[in-house]
Amino acid sequence: MVDVSRIPPPLTTLWDWQLDAACRDIDSTMFFHPEYERGAEKTSRDSRAKAICRRCPVIEACRGHALAVHEPYGIWGGLTAAERTALLGERGSAMGEFRAAATVSTGAEQLFEYLSTVSNLPLYLAPMTSATPKGGLWFRVDRDTRRIEWGSEGLGGYHGFLTITSAGDETELRVRVTRRPGRDVQRDLDETLATIKRLAGCAG
């Protein structure tokens, strides 16, 4: 069960910043989600909590504490536990660039129309499971160059693109993703292109 009383009292000079915290007189459940809370309800509460953090005069000290001790729960210094975990991971690793390419026999324009339809993304783009934008995710299409781009404005800075180019009787696909190491990114790219080739074969 989540402990909602983890905000410690100011015991020494180390904790003096808490005396000026904007959250001192606010119920701690605003910053530590109840065990049953999920989905939109949690997102809404997180947003309200972060709004309080943004006007807090000691937001940097609070955030620094949470990162230093690896606080496992709650919103501290305007960051959720997941955001802190991502940020700590970033500090120990550099961005990596991953590429893959393939050719298919389907026409470039026909394939581009299918791949650039947002609702089709989860059908071919690994490991995406939903076409609903979440957590700062974005998606854009350049029809003139047949280029599809996606990414996240979050702490990870993940982004990628897919280009679709006519090459004689074939269509050439090139995909590139920039992100921090974690899951097997190259495998995801290879799986994405394999799925597109399979879909293109069915369409042909």
Image (cartoon, helix red, strand yellow):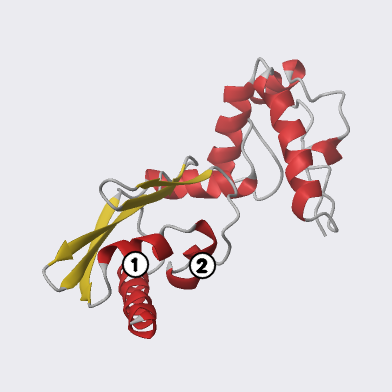
Q: Position of residue 7 (x, y in %)?
A: 77, 36
Q: Residue furthest left?
A: 168
Q: Relative to the observer, which residue lies in front, 107 or 97?
A: 107
Q: Quick one: quadrant of the C terminus?
A: bottom left
The residue where tag 2 is placed is 122
Task: Name the side, left or right, on which 88 lies relative to 2.
Answer: left
Q: Quick one: quadrant of the N terminus?
A: bottom right
Q: Position of residue 198 (x, y in %)?
A: 36, 83
Q: Relative to the observer, which residue lies in front, 174 or 187?
A: 174
Q: Residues within 10 Å of mark 2 (few under 14, many from 20)?
A: some
- Which mark is on residue 111? 1
On the image, which quarter does residue 6 sit in? top right
- Which badge, 1 or 2, comes first in the chain's sequence? 1
Q: Is residue 94 above or below residue 23?
A: below
Q: Secondary structure at mark 2?
A: helix
Q: Secondary structure at mark 1?
A: helix
Q: Relative to the observer, which residue lies in front, 59 or 83?
A: 83
**Front tag of 1 and 2:** 1
In three-dimensional space, the C-alpha distance between marks 1 and 2, rounded to whole angstroms, equals 16 Å
